[in-house]
Amino acid sequence: MGAGQLGQMLALAGRRLGLEMRFLSPDADAPAGQVAELIVADYENEAALAHFVEGLDVATYEFESIPAAAVRFVAERVPTYPPLEALETGQDRGNEKQCFERLGIPTAPFAIVESMRELREAVDRIGLPAVVKTRRLGYDGKGQAVIRTRDEIAGAWVKVAGVPSIVESFVKFSRELSIISVRSTSGDTAFYPLVENHHTEGILRFSLAPAPNITRETQSTAESIAKRVMDELGYVGVLAIELFETEQGLVANEMAPRVHNTGHWTIEGADTSQFENHLRAITGFTIGSTEMWGAAGMVNVIGNEPNVAMLRQIPDVHVHMYGKSPKPRRKLGHITVTADDLEGVRSKVSEVRRVLTR
Ligand code: AMP
């Protein structure tokens, strides 16, 4: 379910594993439809959902804003992973934060708010600066507002359109990291090295893997966070958790119950890509090695068509275009670079970014 670029990359990985794949999306131009069978229908259309599940051995989804009712309909007819509870946790920031809290995973102090009065009261408790985020449907920095002074509370509430939201403390972080993990149907887990992520205007611009200067202890803390979440949710498939690195250690920001933009480098940079491992997990295969060799970087292509001819001239640069039409802020593709070490990756990432902004 879902047929964006994540679905497209799952389809490509699935072909190599000998899987036959079918996608469902309301968008006739969805990227996965360019490489696999696509049923075009709304997620609310039960006749289409029934047609979609016909003959399937297993189902999965590639974006977390999919209506839970559609996933429930499918899950009642065919094994569906990650489990519905994981979707309902990942698609609602309130549930997500409560899950972190329940598991003793550090996360910014927060409150669930449903009115401006509740927001004011919560700000009194939590303090400023703070961030308001809609519980649902927020992504790439949408549905968020920063509150620095009490005068900004009303404006922030308008910005999130007065829908059920959370408000949380602004975290003083030194950098943003993510951990991509995978759990099989038999409960085995594996983890990729922590990734360092760079955002501008709420959109991921580039990632470095492994994240520079990560101690063994930080890696194992991140793995333990991911493992606790996966075990709690009876998780099967790939899970991404975004983390802030702070002076007090790692602080969990959010999770995505799916393959993730910060794991795209694994296609060329790791023994087994996140896409293959997701499919291996949900189809009951053993998980493939998550070892990486050397270092890798990933740069998103956002808004404008890139000069692919120029990019191809840089050695060890891999272009992935998703076949989407250009639009401001839209992710059109990504570029992976590989090198023996992070020094080499950094210089190639800079070169790629120069070509992209030309
Ligand atoms: P999110 O959609 O939660 O990933 O937020 C988008 C971006 O906003 C994050 O990648 C951070 O750069 C920033 N951000 C989100 N929440 C906080 C926070 N509590 N404190 C500081 N920055 C934040």
Image: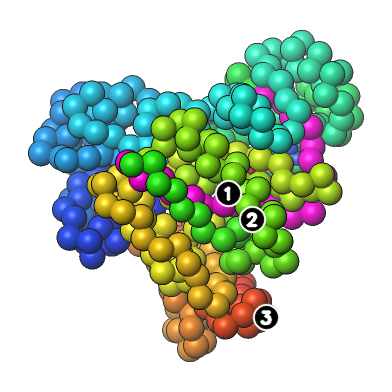
Q: Which amino acid type is marked by label 3?
A: Glu
The tag on residue 93 is: none
Residue 296: % across, % down: 55, 72
Q: Which amino acid type is marked by label 1?
A: Glu
| Callout 2: SS | helix
The answer to the question of whether label 3 and label 1 lie on touching residues, with beta carbons closer than 8 A, is no
Relative to residue 211, is residue 238 depicted above or below?
Answer: above
In the image, the segment drawn in magenta is 166-185
Q: Which residue is mark 2?
A: 219
The answer to whether residue 4 of the structure is visible from this angle is: no
Give the Cα distance between marks 1 and 2. 6 Å
| Callout 3: SS | helix
Residue 206: % across, % down: 60, 63
Which quadrant: the C terminus?
A: bottom right
Which quadrant: the N terminus?
A: top left
Residue 185: % across, % down: 32, 41
The tag on residue 223 is: 1
Q: Is mark 1 within 8 Å of ligand 1?
A: no
Give the Cα distance between marks 3 and 1. 25 Å
Q: Quadrant of residue 77?
A: top left
The residue drawn where x is 74% and y is 50% is 245
